[in-house]
Image (cartoon, rainbow, N blue to C red):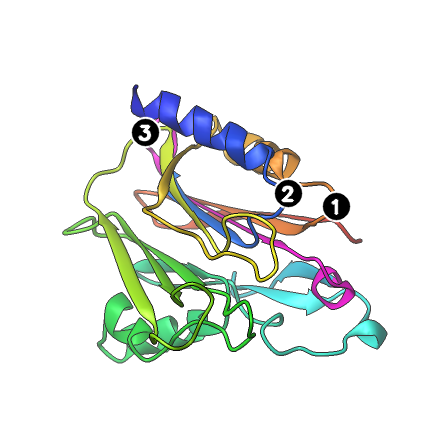
């Protein structure tokens, strides 16, 4: 089976999954001219669903309560999913975005920054922290993905730390990691290695394809960053269920 066939098969599985939770796809445009980041959030509770993505003048993207009067607990749901530095675009499902951003500015690395963090403190799920980084200089890596998770929804064994590093940009393809396998109680954490996923013709079609693939009841917001490989400038597209 070709990489593209695997990606198409995985995309179909995603479209049939009621609750993969938050998800990251890192990849490359079909023409090879852009590096691509996709990130989405989903929610089951009213508090989790009461969110939108907003972009600041800096280009950073943050989550924000759609209706501030209904915000009951900002812990774990209000954060910057997307920030960037001159040589790196960072995407995560929590406030570890700031940890990576600050760590690299101080001379550290993606891995060293995440070594100071672990999965979320939301027992009994112990939701994984998933993170991605795309580099301007593709040496040694074009991008990396990380997951910090518990073993079998238990804190007993400590934090399982996995980093996946990709040396080559594959046009029209990307790698995907999510917080969960699917819905459950407790919700089972993502297992295995990142999966191949398709990157569509342009940012708009990529946004539409992934947004339409997500479960209509549980999806909340989605963003696509289309990063020019020459200038490293990004076009960011957002879609929110509310608003």
Measure the C-alpha gap from mark 3 to mark 2: 28 Å
* 54 sits left or right of 230 in the view: right
Q: Is residue 102 left or right of residue 199?
A: left
Res. 163 visible in picture:
yes
Q: Residues within 10 Å of mark 3 (few under 14, many from 20)?
A: some
Query: Residue extending furthest left?
Result: 140
Identity of the residue furthest to the right in this view: 69
Q: Are marks 2 and 1 in contact (CB under 8 Å)?
A: yes
Disc on the earlier residue, 3 or 1: 3
Tell me which segment is drawn in magenta: 28-50
Residue 78 is inside the magenta segment: no
Side of 60 where 114 appears, left or right: left
Q: In the displayed structure, would residue 83 be above or below residue 173?
A: below
- Residue beneath disc 1: 217
Mark 2 lies on a secondary structure that is loop
State the residue position of label 2: 18
């Amino acid at each position: 089976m070709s990489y593209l066939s695997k990606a198409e098969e995985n995309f179909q599985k995603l479209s049939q999954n009621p609750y993969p939770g938050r998800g990251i796809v890192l990849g490359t445009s079909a023409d090879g001219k852009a590096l691509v980041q996709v990130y989405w959030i989903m929610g089951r509770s009213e508090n989790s669903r009461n969110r939108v993505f907003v972009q600041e003048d800096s280009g950073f993207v943050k989550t924000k309560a759609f209706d501030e009067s209904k915000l009951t607990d900002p812990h774990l749901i209000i954060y910057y999913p997307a920030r960037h530095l001159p040589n790196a675009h960072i995407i995560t499902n929590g406030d570890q975005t700031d940890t990576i951003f600050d760590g690299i500015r101080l001379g550290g690395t993606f891995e060293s920054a995440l070594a100071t963090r672990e999965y979320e403190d939301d027992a009994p799920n112990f939701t994984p922290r998933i993170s991605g980084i795309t580099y301007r200089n593709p040496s040694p890596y074009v991008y990396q993905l990380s997951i910090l998770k518990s073993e079998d929804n238990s804190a007993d064994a400590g934090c399982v730390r996995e980093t996946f590093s990709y040396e080559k940009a594959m046009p029209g393809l990307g790698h995907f990691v999510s917080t969960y396998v699917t819905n459950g109680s407790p919700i089972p954490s993502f297992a295995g290695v990142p999966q191949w996923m398709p990157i569509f013709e342009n940012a708009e079609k990529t946004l539409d394809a992934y947004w339409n693939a997500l479960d209509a009841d549980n999806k909340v917001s989605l963003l696509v960053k289309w990063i020019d490989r020459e200038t490293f400038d990004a076009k960011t597209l957002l879609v929110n269920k509310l608003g």
